Amino acid sequence: MRRSLSWDGMRLALAVWCVLAGGLLFASAPASATEPVAPAIQNLSATEITDETATLEAQINPENSETAYEVVIANPCGGPPDCILSSGKIPATTAREYVRIELASKKLNLEPNTTYEYWVVAKNTDAQKAEVHNTFTTLKIPTIDSESVGGVIEHDAILEAKINPEGQDVYYQFQIVKNPSEFLPEMACPAEHSAELCLGSPATAGALPIGFLLAGPGDETVGLDLERERGITLQPETTYHYRVIVVSSPLTEDTITWKGPPAYGADQTFTTEAPRTTGLGLLTSDSFSGGSGNFSPQSPTLVKPKTPAQVRAAKLAKTLKLCRKDHKKSKRTKCERAARKKYGPQKTKHKQK
């Protein structure tokens, strides 16, 4: 009996010793460290692309290590550091850093219909590096595919054009003069280029109100009836020169600043009909004077009620003001786009007589 107890005690002592020894070994072993992870670059893209600019966007996850990053474009630039569009540091965190660069502010002079390469480089304090490349292609310059005139009578005509906005929001304007040397070199509108007054505004000498087209993939037909829509009365048996100017422009500006080179239509002409006769003789009109060679925008003796186009222009002006008052930049663009789509100049289609 005594021998049996002694053997049991030895087994118990050995078991206790093994447990204690294992604990000491575990406590003295070094803790395994987490291996550093390279930063992650996600959702690299180019948005708001036009014929001369774009906005670059990306998300950078530092993966819980302090990370430095650079956004680089290959061309056009004079070499580093001009090629570096943006740089910065992200603290050690698991949250993503959102990077956004508007190239319009960088004055890079991008060319239309040209592909550019850009990339983002991110490197953490453990020398772990990530690099992602991408490209974007600027849009073509808006084009004027055709110009025409219809409904020509003694005192009226309908000017039409087919415009390809090439995927951009564009402004357009018909210009009409008696002498082609008096064509205006650029778009013109009254009231110090105030955007809401330029759209559907009263005509200025040599230029009709400015119209607006939303971005589209193909031709859009625009037209304007001079007398019925604008109250402009032409002279009989008179030859007029006309053309169209088209230019892209951002939606969010309070004043219209023309962007990029305008597209000019060709010099076109038409001649109004001769005065009509009655049993009492000729019916003539002096309401279209143009003493300097330009057309007079509106008859000085004729007072007309507001046309549907003028009513729409007034509603557009009011809505645009509310967009600027009630919305910040991101939502203001959508508001203005919807306003112009609802109240902007309507497209008219007329068969040539």
Image: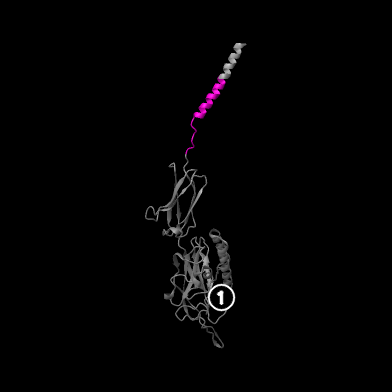
Magenta stretch: give its range: 14-35
Magenta-span inclusion, residue 40: no
Location of residue 110 in the rendering, given as x and y in whole percent from the top left corner: 42, 59
Q: Which is more toward the observer, 186 or 42?
A: 42
Up the image or down, 219 lies above or below 177; here it is above
Count of residue discs: 1
Report the residue at 59% width, 16% height from top: 8
Q: Residue at x 56, y 22 (%)?
A: 16
User: Could you tell whether 114 is left or right of 287 in the image?
Assistant: left
Residue at left 45%, top 54%?
136
Image quadrant assignment for residue 225: bottom right
Q: Amino acid at mark 1?
A: Arg
Asked where in the image residue 318 lies, by quadrant, the reply is bottom right
In the depicted view, which residue is nearer to us: 228 or 253?
253
Main SS category, magenta section: helix
* Residue 246 visible (yes or no): yes
Which quarter of the image is occupied by the N terminus? top right
Circle 1 is placed at which residue position? Answer: 228
The x and y percentages for residue 15 are 56, 21
| Residue 145 in the image: above or below residue 289 | above
Residue 82 at x, y percent in the picture: 39, 54
Residue 185 position (above or below residue 13) = below
Disc 1 residue crowd, few under 14, some 14–19, many 20+, Cα 10 Å: some
From where the camera sits, is residue 353 visible?
A: no
Q: Is residue 25 one of those drawn in magenta? A: yes
Q: Is the residue 292 above or below the residue 80 in the image?
A: below
For the view shown, which residue lies furthest in the right direction? Answer: 1
Q: For mark 1, give the secondary structure.
A: helix
Q: Measuring from the top left, give residue 198's x and y in whole percent.
A: 51, 70
